Image (cartoon, grey):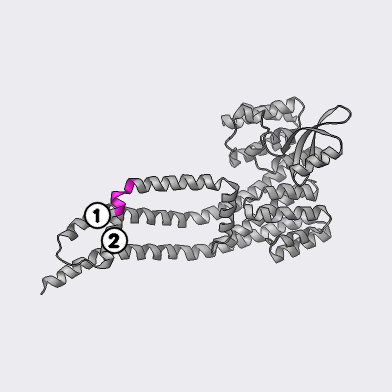
Amino acid sequence: MQFQVRVGTPEGRVLEQTFVASDEPALLTELGKLGYHVFEVRRRGLPRKLGAAGIFGRRRKPIPIQEFMVWNRELAALLKAGLPLLQAMDMMLERMENQHFKAVLTDIRDRVKSGQDLSEAFEEHGELFPRLFPSTLKAGEKSGELEQVIRRFIRYLKLVMDARRRVITALVYPVVLMCLSIVMISVMMVYVVPKITVFFENLEVQLPLMTRMLIAVSGFAHRNVVWLALGVVGGAAAFRAWNRTEAGRLWLDRAKLKLPFLGPVLHRFAITELCRSLATLLSGGIPLVPALEIATDAVGNLEVRQAIAPQIQLVREGKPFHEALERSGVFFEMSIDMIKVGEATGSLDEMLTSVADFLDEQIETRMGRILTLIEPMMLVFMGIIVSMILVAIYLPLVSALGQSQY
């Protein structure tokens, strides 16, 4: 992990530097051995308790990725045209329409004007932007190739967004179909069946078991429709709050990976996130261990992230990178073999990109297969439920007609 630390030296100076440690207690122990007095410690990419967070509030809405990409494209174009950084930022601020984004960029511009690096200024608002962006900027500032680094980050962001869009687009139709099925069945149970129940009361026949069960469920839903709706809303709110906790998110992410059909797709997507992030950071000149810490922290699935995080210490101790990934238990054998070749030939960033491209192709293929299975399965399920309701409604009518003939 990377920490931004403000310390007092034995000579009486106050410095703010970046240190790498496994956790905060280990960092404090190491700094104590060096004779430093620690004033403030914070994780890289997290806002200060005061300052930026105090100005804008504790919780802020992240900047939309599309707007952020457009801003990066414009910044790269202006830098390529030879404009100084501050002048380029001022020009873009004049045409900024998103007031929230404009306020954040104004604060960043002011920090840069006061002498702070652009990467450090973005770290002050780290929760609003992709986690890799400040580290990518720092690599560009050190190499003097800020414009090229920004363009490389744009390509990375576009590839990640395209992969997410493909997965989401593939799931839209099944989700819509499932929601329509739930709405239709709910309407039948709450409004249609209770009206037919009045007709059943006038029939002098013994109602079949299926019909009695349908009437009981429908009557309960009709009498308690408000409470059921409040229960659904309350349950959704409680689930959302629980999902925001680390334990809840870990359980949910672990369950996602175990889903039939969809679990392997989400697993591959998490590995793709890590590979693309790591390749972008390595190609920007960031060493492997800090790059791996940042890239691991950027993985969306907490289960995969926690499996990889302990292996970073092995890489720090000199173990081969591919061996550390193999011990994590979440990487596929073919991916490990490809990374091993890239590590041996000195082209690890290129091989990581190849691994991500290969997994993207597998994701697209598997999503196509899932769709061919889910669509007919949803239609069959919907047809079975509706058929059971209709059979339960018509059985008493058939019984009544049969008795009237005798």
The spot of residue 29 in percent (x, y) is 81, 41
List x then y, in percent, for residue 126: 67, 38
Magenta segment boundaries in residue numbering: 220-226
**Residue shown at the point (11%, 70%) measured from the top left:** 404
- Residue beneath disc 1: 194
Q: Secondary structure at mark 2?
A: helix
Check the image and report above or below for 345 versus 122: below
Q: Position of residue 48 (x, y in %)?
A: 68, 32
Q: Amino acid at mark 1?
A: Pro
Residue with the mark numbered 2: 214
- Residue 222 is inside the magenta segment: yes
Residue 145 in sight in this render: no
Q: Residues within 10 Å of mark 2 (few under 14, many from 20)?
A: many
Who is closer to the viewer here, 364 or 310? 310
Label drawn at residue 204: none
- In the depicted structure, whether residue 13 falls above or below residue 249: above
Q: Residue furthest bottom?
A: 406
- Looking at the image, tell me whether mark 2 or mark 1 is earlier in sequence order: 1
User: Which amino acid type is shown beneath numbered disc 2?
Assistant: Leu
Which of the image's four quarters has the C terminus? bottom left
